[in-house]
Structures are given as C-alpha cells and as structure tokens.
Image: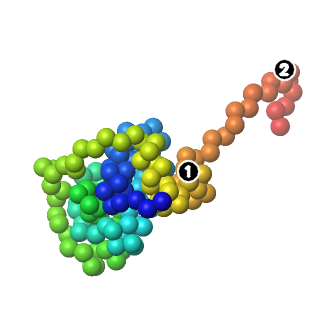
Amino acid sequence: MEYSIDDLSRALFIVNRHAKTAPNPKFLYYLKKQTLEKLIQDGKAKKLGLHFSKNPKNSQQRSDLLVSVGEYYFHIPPQKADFESLPHLGELNETYRNPKTNLPLSKAKLILQSYTGIRESDSDNNHQGPPSKRKYTKPVFKKLGQSYF
C-alpha cells in the first residue's frame, strides 16, 4: 500500500513519542531509524544538519542528525559522512514543537512496518530486541557433609 508523506510523518511522530516512555523502546527506535533512512533514500525526507544532543551519554558533547519529513522534524544518530557534508546547527531550538497528531500506536506501527517491510521479530535477529534472560533454576541442597562439586 502506498502511504503519503503526511501519513508516514504522523506515524513516525506517534512511534517516536511512545518510544520515549515505553518500558522497552528498542523496537520503536529501530523502526523509527529504519523508516527515516528509507525515506531519505527514497527522496521523501531531507537531512538538514547536525544539532548538539540534549542528552549526551558518556561524552561531553554528541551530535544528532536533524531530518525533515513533511511538517515534522526528527533526530537520529548521524553517520560519519554526515559530519563532513552537513552544516552544524549548534544548540537545539527548544521553542519549536512538531504539530500535534492523534493516531493509535498500533496503527502507526502498522503504517511504518508496511512501508519498511520490518516485522517486530526482525529486530530480534538484528540484536535490537531485549537481551535474553537466563532461566531460573531451583537451588540444589546436598546432605550435610556432601560436596557440591
């Protein structure tokens, strides 16, 4: 199914907003990044420049790539070539906000998944999903004086 840029940008906005508060946001961020990369590749989105990150992890400074899709703006991690080819826009402008939209998360995910061809199980294969937990095993108690080894 063919989606308009407006539909895709609204779905991206919803997925990004939910990813910020989700208990396990890895798949939502993975879906966002893959969608933006495909939109850029298809010429439906435009790389505008680099912003200093609001929340740099362990470093003093980190930059994020600003991407424009329709009326919406998103940040994704930049690639090496972006630093050489795009201007650095400095600090993030806190006064700008993306337009509000109402769309259920399930529908937004469906739109982006059908556009990119990504399924939720695909992200597990790419090590983007949650780490696997070890299965609980009951402790074994030996009689007094017996070795555990």
**Circle 1 — which element?**
helix
Which residue is most to the left?
95
Circle 1 residue = 120
**Circle 2 — which element?**
loop
Q: Which residue is drawn at the image coordinates 35% and 46% (left, top)?
A: 14
Count every numbered label the image shows and give the total. 2
Percent x, y of residue 103:
36, 42
Question: Where 47 sits versus 52, above or below?
Answer: below
Query: As drawn, is 141 to the left or to the right of 28?
Result: right
Percent x, y of residue 135:
69, 37
Query: As drawn, is 24 to the left or to the right of 19?
Result: right
Q: Which residue is drawn at the image coordinates 58% and 56% (left, top)?
A: 122
Q: Amino acid at mark 2?
A: Leu
Q: Quadrant of the C terminus?
A: top right
Spatial CA span between label 2 and label 1:
50 Å
Mark 2 or mark 1: whose residue is earlier in sequence? 1
Circle 2 residue = 144
Percent x, y of residue 89:
17, 66
Q: Which residue is drawn at the image coordinates 58% and 47% (left, top)?
A: 131
Percent x, y of residue 102:
31, 40
Label disc, if present, on residue 54 of the rendered structure: none
In this rendering, does residue 20 appear at all? no
The image quadrant of residue 76 is bottom left
Q: Which residue is drawn at the image coordinates 28% and 79% (left, top)?
A: 84
Question: Where 4 sits versus 98, above or below?
Answer: below
Crowd around label 2: few <14 · some 14–19 · many ≥20 (10 Å) = few
Q: Look at discs 2 and 1 and give the one toward the viewer.
A: 1
Question: Where 6 sits versus 49, above or below?
Answer: above
Crowd around label 1: few <14 · some 14–19 · many ≥20 (10 Å) = some
